[in-house]
Amino acid sequence: MDSVIVLLNRHEDAKAIALLQREPHLIDKCDDDGNTLAHWAIFTSSGKLLSFLVNTINETSQNDDERRTRLICMFETKNKCKLHSVDCSISRAQYSFMMFLLQHCCPNGNAVLTDESVKAAFESDCVPCLKYIR
């Protein structure tokens, strides 16, 4: 997982995706702080990685239950800062990422929006996020 994170920090999305294609077991891993690759896609503003993760999970899951479980683990698991990917996108004022996650990645949809989401939106001054959450 560390090598993927290094590539993402260098904004070498294509290389990170190629590595994940060669080593797909890394897709479901977390770093030491509990960040999934979805968190890292948001931290590095990598829409390509986010799309790759969703497509890969959808294509490689054996059935709908497994797909749903993997999506929840990837996108709704909270890191050590107690933020899941939607809240990370809100705290970074990435409204388009937030909408993508809610519409395509989070099986629980708007249920992942919590008081923390509102707090993150206020702190990041993400007006579109605030309007959506309200």
Image (cartoon, grey):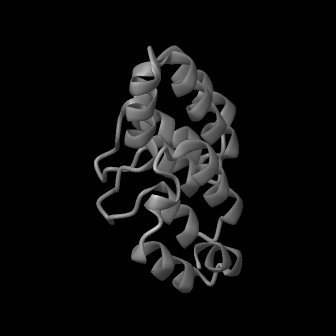
Relative side of 28 to 46, left or right: left
Please name the residue shown 65% across and 72% down the image: 132
Using the image as rendered, state which of residue 47 and residue 104 is in the foreground.
104
Quadrant in the rendering for residue 72: top left
Position of residue 77 in the picture relative to residue 98 (left or right): left
Q: Is residue 106 above or below residue 113?
A: above
Whether residue 113 is visible: yes
The vertical placement of 40 against 91, above or below, is above
Q: Residue 11: x, y in percent? A: 66, 45
Q: In the picture shown, does residue 88 fall above or below 8?
A: below
Quadrant position of residue 112: bottom left
Q: Is residue 19 visible?
A: no
Please indicate whether residue 116 sits to the left or right of residue 47 in the image.
Answer: left
- Which residue is painted at 61% across and 46% down in the image? 10
Q: Percent position (x, y) of residue 87?
A: 48, 65
Residue 106 in the image: state x and y as whole percent: 51, 47
Name the quarter where the N terminus is drawn: top left
Q: Residue at x 40, y 26 (%)?
A: 65
**Camera-nearest residue between 94 and 130:** 130
- Relative image position of residue 24 (x, y in whole percent): 46, 20
Q: Quadrant of the C terminus?
A: bottom right
Counting labels gives: 0
Along the viewing direction, whichever of 46 and 59 lies nearer the viewer: 59
